[in-house]
Image (cartoon, grey):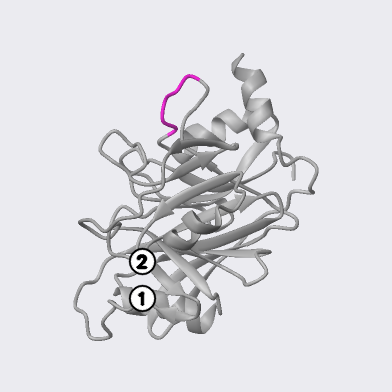
Amino acid sequence: MRLALLTAVFLTGSAMTAQAADCHDQTYLDNRYTVCTVDLTTEDLRLFLNDDEGQIWGQFRRLDNALGTQGKRLGFAMNAGMYHPDRKPVGHYREGGVEQMRVIPNAGPGNFGMLPNGVLCLNDGSAQVYETLRYAEQKPECRDATQSGPMLVIDGKLHPRFLKDSDSRYIRNGVGTSADGKTAYFVISNNTVTFHEFASLFRDELKTPNALYFDGNISRLYAPELRRHDGGFPMGPIVGTVEPEND
């Protein structure tokens, strides 16, 4: 049963020719980042939370090992949204067309509740970041979706609560999508940055009209081409690409 379910989950996007995400280090306005660019027209990008026995994947290596039983591997991955101590998502979560957590539209404590927050929506061949209330109103079809917050960029503008002179600095990670939904940029800072600095990278350098914050402090990246595998405590939702093991 385990192998059968893994086959169904991991081979959903097999119609496309899976390619490797392009991960590289870059500096922007004196801050250091790693950017992983995913071409949705050629790459198999998806979300992961539980294995077929209902256990949280938790670690990149565990997920990669499971993919290996199917002749696949994890191309790149990062944590993809805030989670409770039991690793369950704080907000909306959808995987393989099945909703596991509803949309949370209201304000609340912490970064997640700093409205507007948003949702990353994945389908075969496309990825889009939606502001949460727009997502709830439009109800787009999403194979996979994860809610997090705050939004970093909303229709080309920085989140209104980000201060240019803020002294709140953390390692941060997030995602921005191109206007046509064919490209997604996953970014982690390699030194502590403010929200304003981090969001400015997406708006001004990567030119993404919408971008979403995933988390800070616990932010982690798996990028084998850079020989990077960030460890630590088990994570909740993971986003990553799946590619053939022998590529």
In this rendering, the answer to whether 187 lies above or below 47 is below
Q: Residue at x 64, y 19 (%)?
A: 3
Q: Nearer the viewer, residue 143 or 62?
A: 143
Q: Which residue: 20% across, 72% down? A: 168
Q: In the structure shown, which secondary structural element does the residue marked by tag 2 occupy?
A: loop
Q: Are marks 2 and 1 in contact (CB under 8 Å)?
A: yes
The overriding secondary structure of the stretch rendered in magenta is loop
Q: Residues within 10 Å of mark 2 (few under 14, many from 20)?
A: many
The image quadrant where one finds the C terminus is: top right
Q: Is residue 166 left or right of residue 172?
A: left
**Where is 224 relative to 99, above or below?**
below
Name above or below for residue 102 compared with residue 197.
Answer: above
Q: Of the residues under marks 2 and 1, which one precedes in the sequence?
A: 2
Q: Secondary structure at mark 1?
A: loop
Q: Residue at x 32, y 73 (%)?
A: 195
Quarter of the image for residue 209 reads bottom right
Residue 202 position within the rendered picture, expressed as x and y whole percent measured from the top left: 48, 75
User: How many numbered callouts?
Assistant: 2
In the picture of the structure, the residue carrying the numbered disc 1 is: 159
- Magenta-drawn segment: 53-57
Asked if residue 166 is among those painted magenta in the image, a careful observer would answer: no
- Check the image and report above or below for 102 versus 62: below
Q: Which residue is found at the position 74% from the left and 58% from the top?
A: 41
Which residue position is annotated with label 2? 116
